[in-house]
Amino acid sequence: AQSVTQLDSQVPVFEEAPVELRCNYSSSVSVYLFWYVQYPNQGLQLLLKYLSGSTLVKGINGFEAEFNKSQTSFHLRKPSVHISDTAEYFCAVSEGTNAGKSTFGDGTTLTVKP
Amino acid sequence: GAVVSQHPSWVICKSGTSVKIECRSLDFQATTMFWYRQFPKQSLMLMATSNEGSKATYEQGVEKDKFLINHASLTLSTLTVTSAHPEDSSFYICSARVGSSEAFFGQGTRLTVV
């Protein structure tokens, strides 16, 4: 069985500051990792994904994440946030043997203050 | 890119009635779709895996007689909430598997039972 832990439930940050949202996972098999963003009353938008290859993954809106297999982590980073980045962020994992069937973390609320 | 559409986006129904939610893959065929449920300010919980032409596989604790899933074609899966009650009020999100590594999400359906 797989699990995902998002280490911070809320992250307040000032505009133009850097941010890191932390995600750890556990799984007994190879995994695919994802970060999604959700705005109020909307579905999920894929920010980035790690399937294989380079451990540094770049996504949309200036976000990037690094897959660290030894630490079983997939932290999301952005060097300079905007007010519009305020949203809920979910880390998710799916196992290579059952792609698409995802386990989600509890989410991190990112609040960007002016 | 792959587009998944849910209909309706929101629905209000009376307690005791049934409501059907559709999940369509618009530009690809999906043999496998997934249904998730999200309570306010909580994460997504997988309810079931929907396979075209066969019975859905439900996660532990999900009442299959209450949440009927039909995947009659390669582009459409439906979730019917039968005899809905206020506690069934939630945000329901579907996803459709693309290729062998990931799934794309619909925009979600907000169900309110009054």
Image (cartoon, coloured by chain):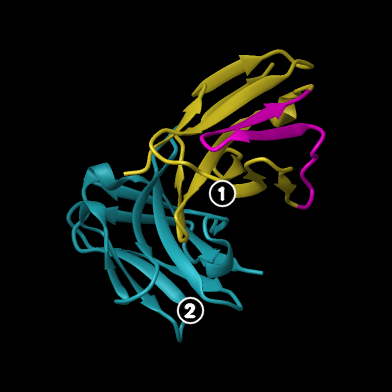
The color chain B is rendered in: yellow
Residue B89 at what x, y percent from top left?
66, 28
Discs 1 and 2 lie in a common subunit:
no
The color chain A is rendered in: cyan
Would you identify the image quadrant in which residue B56 lies? top right
* Mark sitting on residue A72: 2
Residue occupying image coordinates x 34% and y 48%? A111
Image vertical order of residue A54 relative to residue B8, above or below? below
Residue occupying image coordinates x 52% and y 21%? B8
Query: CA–CA distance between discs 1 and 2?
Result: 20 Å
In this picture, residue A102 sits left or right of residue A70:
right
Extent of the magenta region: B60-82
Q: Secondary structure at mark 1?
A: loop
Q: Secondary structure at mark 2?
A: loop
Q: Which residue is mark 1?
A: B43
Q: Is residue A78 magenta?
A: no
Q: Given the image, what chain letter belongs to the residue carrying mark 2?
A: A
In front of the other: A34 or B1? B1
In front of the other: A100 or A61? A100
